[in-house]
Amino acid sequence: MDRYFNNDAIGIIEANADFRITRANRGACRILGYSAEELCQLTWADFTHPDDIQKITDHFMSLFEAGQLGQAVEVRHITKSGAQIENSVNVQAGESGPDGRPSYYVAFIMDITRLKQAERALQDSARSLSVLHEKIGHALNDAVQHRDPYTADHQSHVARLASRMCDLLGLPMLQHNTVVAAAGVHDVGKIAIPNEYLTKPAKLDELEFAVLRTHAQHGFQILRPMEIDFPVAEIVYQHHERLDGSGYPRGLCNGAIMIEAQIIAAADTVDAIINARPYRRALGKDHAIRVLTEERGLKLGADIADACITAIGELP
């Protein structure tokens, strides 16, 4: 144990059975702002945030009774200067005394204040993106709605399906919200496409389809000036790309295609299949699942296709 005490990269504190500190290393002194002598005059409660004392005591007692000491827990501590910091604390029990209780405890302390601040900043960014998505998405969707009601409804359907896929894939909140933001406006570039092409009750000819394919680039050009820190425009630009390079407009493949764009690509494909188009009837969920199965690992990532198939099964 002595050689660990000489490591000041983390804080190490030893306390007796009554939780009174008996020694502390340089790391603990650095984190808490006390000298080793000062810490040895204190108990854990003296520098633990008042609102955390009972919670932490109960937590460690429950771990001890279950024989599971060694699990880290996040604790708010108050430094000597009065600053509130956040630490990750891992407590190990020493040898048991005659009464069966540990005769001492050793706590390993890591300062995670900056990490927690970064997490909160990330959450704030995610909430900001959600608000941004709502404002931009509603405005652009309204503009599309006036020209092409089908496209506006399609974007909403794709956003909902993509959101569920993000849940199934376990994406973090910021990435999830970015996908939903992009999905809600992924076809905004169709504003630049002649309306007669969008509503034509027959398949487009080669020239018409070439014009339609420019909508991804138009969407990128519309959205790019609105970007802050979130790559919504680039995701929209990529949503017709495929892993095997067969997509458009740039023929990207494999690692060049963002996972967010792949999610929207799968959801976009599915919604186009299961709903009626101006030139054909709806083909249904079974057909969509067959297409995803065929494209799995070829045009779409296997995990993306699997998540989409699961999400389809949950549709009413």
Image (cartoon, grey):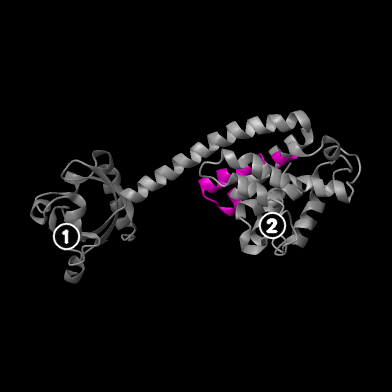
Residue 26 is labelled as 1
Out of 105 and 210, give the one closest to the viewer: 210
Q: Residue at x 78, y 36 (%)?
A: 150
Dot 2: element: helix
Out of 89 and 251, give the one closest to the viewer: 251
Residue 170 lies, with reference to residue 301, above or below; the image says above
Apparent side of residue 279 relative to residue 83 in the rendered image (left or right) = right
The residue furthest right is 202
Q: Residue at x 77, y 54 (%)?
A: 289
The residue furthest bottom is 3
Instruction: Report the quarter where the N terminus lies.
Output: bottom left
Location of mark 2 (residue): 305
- Characterize the magenta stretch by its predominant secondary structure: helix
Which three-letter amino acid code belongs to the residue tagged 1? Arg
Q: Residues within 10 Å of mark 1 (few under 14, many from 20)?
A: many
Q: Residue 66, percent across and down?
A: 34, 58
Q: Residue at x 11, y 56 (%)?
A: 36
Q: Residue 163, percent across and down?
A: 62, 44
Query: What is the quadrant of residue 109 in the picture?
Result: bottom left
Label 1 to label 2: alpha-carbon separation: 52 Å
N-terminal label among 1 and 2:
1
Q: Residue at x 69, y 62 (%)?
A: 243
Q: Is residue 123 visible?
A: yes
**What residue range appears in magenta?**
167-190
Q: Residues within 10 Å of mark 2 (few under 14, many from 20)?
A: many
Residue 249 lies, with reference to residue 50, above or below; the image says below
Query: What is the quadrant of residue 241 in the picture?
Result: bottom right
Q: Is residue 183 visible?
A: no
Magenta span has 230?
no
Which three-letter amino acid code belongs to the residue tagged 2? Ala
Magenta span has 184?
yes
Dot 1: element: helix
